[in-house]
Image: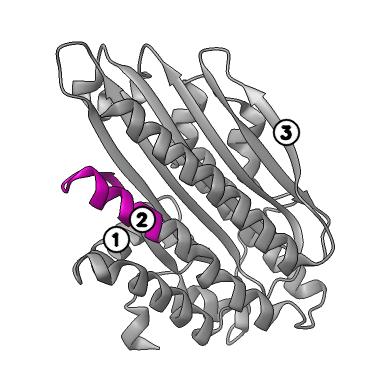
Amino acid sequence: MSHPALNQVIDYLQNLQDQICQALEAADGGATFAQEQWQREGGGGGRSRVLKSGGVFEQGGVGFSHVHGERMPASATAHRPELEGRDFNACGVSLVMHPHNPYVPTSHANVRFFIAEKAGYDPVWWFGGGFDLTPFYPFDEDIKHWHETAKAALDPFGKELYPKFKAWCDDYFWLKHRGETRGVGGLFFDDLNDRDFEQCFAIMRAVGDAYLDAYLPIIERRKNHSYGARERDFQLYRRGRYVEFNLVWDRGTLFGLQTGGRTESILMSMPPLARWEYGYQPQPDSAEERLYSDYLRPRDWLTEL
């Protein structure tokens, strides 16, 4: 199964990267993605696309990668000991967009496929992915739209998937050292192989294809919202949480670094600017306090808003 399946997934992922970049350039209206193709010393490579100083986005990256090798990193074999001694192929599209305007949320999406093979054994494969939203000044209609789009993408495959993947997202993007969520969540899944290959691939495609439907209307509603220094300072402070999560908890970052991936591409998701402030406390009854009290925790966004 491996080679035809792998090529099929790679074709989809490269087309998805093209579609997302074209749509985000159109939404930005002021900048284009610059592409850098790269090769991995141990096998494989990718194409990193970064947009800077745009009309809407301060910086954002949409990366495609396909890496392969003869030996799995320790972080992967600890999680899946059956991978020991297998060749592996890992491919995916990952993106993070950091807008200028604090009223436009940061967004993240990722879809990926992994397959490991060993002579005389069946291949081990799975899909993963998801998308999540990180608003600084949340709007309930935006959050509801984001989650309605996520649910609509998964419902054709079973009504149980959205609540399962939504809860998984809340858990995965929980900053344990802060006791808060990174944002308002969305979808996250990993190790998806409990159906046949075509069904699992279709679920991954549905998630990848839904990202633009979820994010573009929010950009249009918020990109012209006026803001000042206070909102900008708070945005930069909250971006620090993004950095903390990616460097401390994110499995994809760890996998990429341990497999000898390209550091610039792995860390492409970092914001161009962020700030930390010792002992920060939001003003009582402020919009900033409302983010903490009402949004940085798991909630059923489809029924509570």
Q: Amino acid at mark 1?
A: Phe
Which quarter of the picture shows residue 98?
A: bottom right
The answer to whether 67 appears left or right of 197 in the picture is right
Please check the rendered image and state whether residue 201 is part of the magenta-colored stretch, yes or no: yes
What's the CA distance linking mark 2 and mark 1? Answer: 5 Å
- The residue at which mark 3 appears reads as 36
For the residue marked with disc 2, what is the amino acid?
Phe
Name the spot of residue 157 as percent of width and height, x first: 23, 64
- Mark nearer the N terminus (3 vs 1): 3
Q: Nearer the viewer, mark 2 or mark 3?
A: 3
Foreground pick, 214 / 163: 214
Apparent side of residue 111 relative to residue 225 in the rendered image (left or right)? left
Residue at numbered disc 1: 165
- The residue that appears at 15% across and 12% down in the rendered structure is 120
Q: Are circles 2 and 1 on residues that touch, CB within 8 Å?
A: yes
* Above-or-below relation of 290 to 292: below
Residue bounds of the magenta highlight: 189-206
Pointer 2 and pointer 3: residues touching (CB < 8 Å)?
A: no
Q: Position of residue 97 (x, y in %)?
A: 64, 57
For the question of whether residue 179 can be seen, the reply is no
Label whose residue precedes the other's in the sequence (2 or 1): 1
Residue 22's place in the image compared with 297, above or below, is: above
Residue in view at x 40 percent, y 88 percent: 305
Q: Residues within 10 Å of mark 1 (few under 14, many from 20)?
A: many
Q: Circle 3 — which element? A: strand
Q: Amino acid at mark 3?
A: Glu
Residue 188 image label: 2
Of all residues shown, which one is farthest toward the front? Answer: 4
Q: Nearer the viewer, residue 80 or 21?
A: 21
Q: Residue at x 68, y 79 (%)?
A: 220
